[in-house]
């Protein structure tokens, strides 16, 4: 079956702009989580959506937002981009929500802010 | 809050050598523990997991045992191959936090022929 699909794979944006990243989870998975990966901070949790509801949020400013649609596809938006937002953004989908549930990751979207 | 600490890399080994990557954690609850691997240019893949104390996760020759008394989940492989070169991440999820994963900093492993 198809894996987690993230689009686009690469993005270059200018400071102050906004950007929207997309994630299509594995068919049947209702949980989608987003992570930011940078060399300095490592992998940091942004937020999780489950059945269109945000269930958990990490420690990121309000410029970072997300949503989930009825087909479980998710988008994350970053407004007023800063140079420090340059990172690999990873999406992960899970079948359900619970202890020990496996997360399946997409290949990520590499965002460069110039 | 929850946190994961793993040994810093890079770890450079010769083929067929023994690999150990140390991982310790701090959690307020009773977490599940994971090892993920990231190959160049790709996302993360689950390598193995354990959900309760003394559980041993294993996959592709890798093993890790959930040690509650030492809050550790060390990754081991008896004989590495060049194809094992990758970045390895230890992670935990807490029941109260849904599917949120808290990751360690990652350990880059380079296996030379």
Image (cartoon, coloured by chain):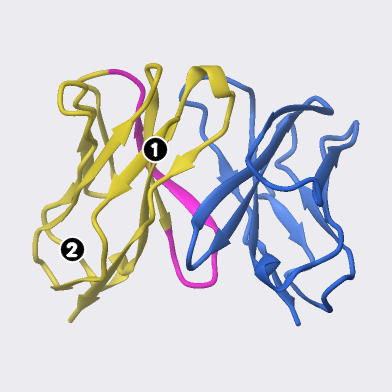
Chain colours: A blue, B yellow
Query: Is B46 within the magenta?
Result: yes
Disc number for residue B3:
1
Image quadrant in which the C terminus of chain A is located: bottom right
Position of A62 relative to B95 (above/below): below
Where residue A84 sits: x, y (%)? Answer: 66, 68
Tag 2 subunit = B
Q: Relative to residue A50, is residue A96 drawn left or right?
A: left
**What range is drawn magenta here?**
B38-52
Depth check, mark 1 against mark 2: the one in front is: 1
Q: Position of residue A46 (x, y in %)?
A: 66, 44
Residue A26 coordinates in the image, percent (x, y): 70, 41
Q: Chain of mark 1?
A: B
Q: x and y percent of residue B83 in the render?
A: 31, 69
Q: What's the residue at 52%, 27% (across, down)?
A: A101
In primary-sequence order, the first of circles 1 and 2 is 1
* Image side of residue B76 versus residue A69, left or right: left
- Residue holding disc 2: B80
Q: Quadrant of residue B111?
A: bottom left
Classify B75 as above or below B87.
above
């Amino acid at each position: 079956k198809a894996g987690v699909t993230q689009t686009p794979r690469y993005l270059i944006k200018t400071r102050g702009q906004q950007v929207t990243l997309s994630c299509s989870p594995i068919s049947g998975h209702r949980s989608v989580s987003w992570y930011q990966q940078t060399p300095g901070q490592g992998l940091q949790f942004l937020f999780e959506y489950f059945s269109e509801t945000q269930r958990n949020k990490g420690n990121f400013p309000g410029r970072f937002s997300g949503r989930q649609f009825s087909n479980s596809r998710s988008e994350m938006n970053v407004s007023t981009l800063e140079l420090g937002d340059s990172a690999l953004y990873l999406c992960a989908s899970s079948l359900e929500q619970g202890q020990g549930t496996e997360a399946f990751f997409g290949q990520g979207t590499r965002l460069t802010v110039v | 809050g929850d946190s994961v600490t793993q040994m810093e890399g890079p770890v450079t080994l010769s083929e067929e050598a023994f690999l150990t990557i140390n991982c310790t954690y701090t959690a307020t609850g009773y977490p599940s523990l994971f090892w993920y691997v990231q190959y160049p240019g790709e996302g993360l893949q689950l390598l193995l997991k354990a959900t309760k104390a003394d559980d041993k996760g294993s996959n592709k020759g890798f093993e890790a045992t959930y040690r509650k008394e030492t809050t550790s989940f060390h990754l081991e492989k008896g004989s590495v191959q060049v194809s094992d070169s990758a970045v390895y991440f230890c992670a935990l999820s807490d029941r109260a936090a849904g599917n949120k994963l808290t990751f360690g900093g990652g350990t880059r492993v380079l296996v030379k022929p």
